[in-house]
Image: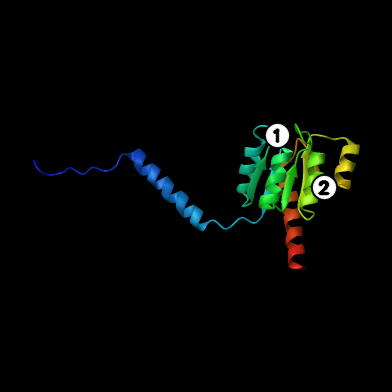
Amino acid sequence: MKGEVEHSAPPVNCQIEVGLRRNKLLMSENKPSPICKILTVDDQMGIDSFFYEFFTARNYEVFNAMSGKAALEIVKKEKPRIILLDINMRGMDGIETLQKIREIDKDAVVIMVTGVKDDDVIRKAMELGADDYITKPLSLEYLDKVVLLKFMNLRLKDLNK
């Protein structure tokens, strides 16, 4: 009819997009705060996003660094409680990064996650203050358990202070 404005429903794609945004908003409002800050340090492409997805799904706040230098800046600024650190990286390697992390934060849990299986390197990392050493390829179930155990130990220390 003339003079009447026809109202039609928004396109289906629009409805889905709005619904998804609303669900994300509701999920973010109900999501509990992260249980712990984790820093992953590995210069291999894709590892950073993999660890990010893996640990955020477990309610950790995750920071990624692709170099030792970047890791040190994050340690200073964000003070992660758990650090997963590769050894073979361009520039500053994991052993040197570990030494510098220990100068900044003696209490952070540092877990070496690397393909290096050399006993001398493992010994040196542990002497410099690494809390654990996991070799690649790694079992995600084992990594998850180790990180959770380290987190629980940190919480016990916090409670006993």
In the displayed structure image, the side of residue 101 where residue 48 appears, left or right: left
**Three-letter residue code for mark 2:** Ala
In percent of width and height, residue 73 lies at: 69, 45
Q: Give the mark nearer the N terminus: 1 vs 2.
A: 1
- Residue to which mark 2 is pinned: 130
| Front in this rendered view, residue 157 or 27 | 157
**Three-letter residue code for mark 1:** Asp
Task: Please identify the quarter of the rendering in which residue 155 is found.
Answer: bottom right
- Residue to which mark 1 is pinned: 43
Give the alpha-carbon distance from disc 1 to disc 2, as whole Å: 19 Å
In percent of width and height, residue 78 lies at: 66, 51
**Label number found at residue 140:** none
Quadrant, the N terminus: top left
Q: Are marks 1 and 2 in contact (CB under 8 Å)?
A: no
> What's the colour scheme?
rainbow
49 up-or-down from 148: above or below: above
Mark 1 residue element? loop
